Amino acid sequence: MFEQIFDAALFDSATRAMIPILLAALGGMICERAGVFQIALEGMMLAGAFAAVAGSYLAISWTLGVVFGIAAGMLISLALAYGTVTRRGDSIVLGIALNLLAMGLTGFLLPQLFDVRGVFQHPRIDGLDRIAIPVLSDIPWIGPVLFDNTLLTYVALLLVPILWVFLFRTPVGLRLRGVGERPLAAETLGVSPTVYKYGAVLASGALAGLAGAQLSLGNVVQFAENMSSGRGWVAVVAVMLGRAHPVGVLAAAALFALAEALGFRFQGNGLPVQITDALPFVVTLLALIIARKRFARLLDLTTAA
Amino acid sequence: MTFELELRGITKRYPGVLANDAVDLAVRPAEIHAIVGENGAGKTTLMSLLYGLFPPDEGEIFIRGERVEFSSALEAIAAGLGMVHQSFKLFPTLSVADNVVFRQEPRRRGLIDRAASVARVRELADRYGLAVDPEAVVEDLPVGVLQRVEILKALYRDANVLILDEPTAVLTPQERDKLFEVIRRLRDAGGTILFITHKLGEVMAISDRVTVLRNGRAVADLVTAETDPAEITLHMTGRAVDLDRRAPEHEPAQVVLKVDSLTVIGEHGRPAVADASFEVRSGEIVGIAGVAGNGQSELIEALCGLRETDGGAVSLVGMEITGADVAGRRSAGLAYIPEDRYAVGTIRQASVSENLLLGHHRNPSIQHRGWFDRQAVARLARRLVEVFDIKAGSVSGPVSTLSGGNLQKVVVAREMEQGTPLLIAEQPTRGLDIGAIEFVHGQLVRFRDQGGAVLMVSAELSEILALSTRILVMFEGRIVADLDPSKVAEPEIGLYMTGAHLEKAVA
């Protein structure tokens, strides 16, 4: 029974589920470190997924699709940055509004631009190829799971150590963390919180856009209405659960992805789809309850500033 | 001669207020120059202007004879000024070294050179006798050390002129003495120090010269060795005040508050208050001395019902209140002047009269079946405003427009008029000027003389000494001393406050 469930195919599908969550959560982590509570990941991911498909369809090129995805995520994040940093609005209210906007806008543009409802599939849409890394992909078991994937998968996994070095070893990373913790203190030393917060929010937009591109050009090659289906929210929780630390965020994203993959598997074994769909969120809820204290502390950190 | 720093005719106006009125200030190289004045005399405004936080309306600033105009603190720092603010501007989760080198990080191949920054900070700390571990995380450090980190930040940025804004407010007497050593060492190394304070003892102890501000004007520039506290006080207040007046003796009567082996578990699972037992009788003021963070806040919150207790018993006029809620305690006879008059003591958006009404709102002469008697409310507000001399434009205006002193009077008036046998006063004069302090002290003494019992927490030893009938000292959650103020001196209390008496006992 155990081996029937935990086979390589399960981990393969868990990896696919993890990458969008990880990319978005890494963006959320940067914002958290800069003192912005980033709750618009869901909307930026969805917009990224839509724009990636649109770009790829127009140019018959996944490269342009990815660029479109990044641009769409950043466009929404720019609105968020302007609203919360420049106009000092509430990031939660604004984030929710942008999430709703992204859902409505993609739902509206889908029939307008492509004359379809629900799902848009077309041979012109150029998907992300799986790139097998020589040697590494031949390692039994983990080789095909980790090293025979899309470019964005490798980007996401490499970003974990890169962002760790960035946050904890570079001057800019130090200043970003300083801004997030005590913006006034940073300002008295000549570090502009505005600039750093804009940078962080825009970076999270780019990363959530990438997450969307992976979703609509990597995991599948199509756009479906509301296809992010809560992954951006799961990413928000992953930031908290992972204590806004790259390795912690990776672990949290892996946990949620495993839950999602297990859900699919149980569905295949005949469990009702409503129950299996709920599994990742049950795990999320449990994780939040277990990590309640950390959660409170992180919220303190973001709101105290 | 060339002054290290010179201000000429500095004027700053705010709507309705002349914060600085043609202030002249001349600071010689390598001197410790004290700037004294009551709160609201314009000290902070003057330093903010000097530090480039906002521009003066009139006047000029010279550094070593050269005219300068700063449009930001950054330019002031570049010109060799360093300011240690009253509220520290540090990053709690970062290390000391990271805090010091922030934005001027030593680098190697684009990354922060950790070893170099730790070494530089250690070298600076050693040179000036600032005992700090560069690798410690700031949030784990006591305030005295945080101040050293702030000084290191300024020194790392090559400050020639160090501005210290009320630097001793948060320190124990021992930490204060260490700070003074550091300041002297900096001066002897050629540095210039501007020392802002309202404590005359410190002016006399540390400064070479002193400039007195009053109502925005520089009213005196004195050589410390040629003056005395009485003269400075006269300049500060324009009149002679006697804060050290010892309260007249009264025989304390029956026990009002009895605390028996009270224990409160704090944030980290350790006891914040450990096995505290004491009594407060009617007609006495019991003062709790201690360095902030040694359990005073937890003790007071537990007594007021704002925090759960984890052992022991509390009774008020013979009635057990250990498990009672706030309302139960208040009706049993407890009034409370909280430490934070802004966040806890008042409701900012509410009017003056609404704030004065709080706690009286259950009184049947004011409220009938859930409705306020508006006339009774107005009468109460008018009476309190008059008796306590609260300067408010209108009692129906928002309380947030009041000055700090008048806001505190609102809190004091409301709590003292509850007609309770016990008054708990937490830092009742923090941040007030001498006039307002005198007033609040007078009210506490009046309350006591009318047979009330007062439990007071204060970080100001002078206040504890001036008012208390008995002094309790708290250290690490325990009450380590019960002293008679007429028989102890400040240094002895300081020993208890820092736990030094424990080391002595062991030795």
Image (cartoon, coloured by chain):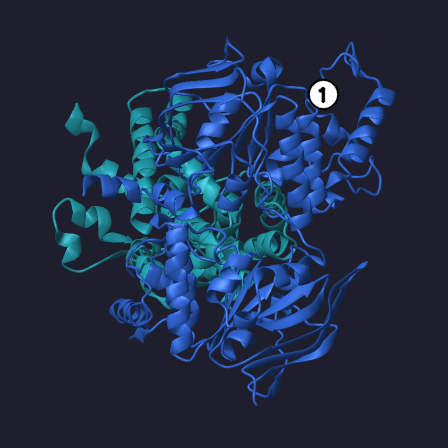
Chain colours: A cyan, B blue
Q: Which residue is rendered at x = 50% and y = 60% of the image?
A: B202
Question: Helix, strand or loop at disc 1?
Answer: loop
**Image check: B76 left or right of B311?**
right
Q: Where is residue B193 in the image (x, y as percent from the top left)?
A: 49, 72
Q: Which residue is rendered at x = 34% and y = 54% of the image?
A: A156
- Is residue A174 visible to us here? no
Name the foreground residue: A294 vs A98: A294
**Image check: B476 left or right of B385?**
left
Question: Crowdedness of circle 1 by 10 Å Cα count: few (<14), some, many (20+)?
Answer: some
**Image check: A15 left or right of B380?**
left
Which chain does tag 1 point to? B
Name the foreground residue: A38 vs B469: B469
Q: Which residue is rendered at x = 71% and y = 35% of the image?
A: B410
Residue pointed to by mark 1:
B360
Looking at this view, name the residue that lies furthest to the right: B375
Does A139 sit above or below residue B378? Answer: below
Q: Position of residue B199 (x, y in %)?
A: 55, 56
Name the foreground residue: B253 vs B69: B253
Does A211 sit above or below residue B76? Answer: above
Name the foreground residue: B350 vs B381: B381
Q: Where is residue A229 in the image (x, y as percent from the top left)?
A: 47, 37
Quadrant that contains the N terminus of chain B:
bottom right
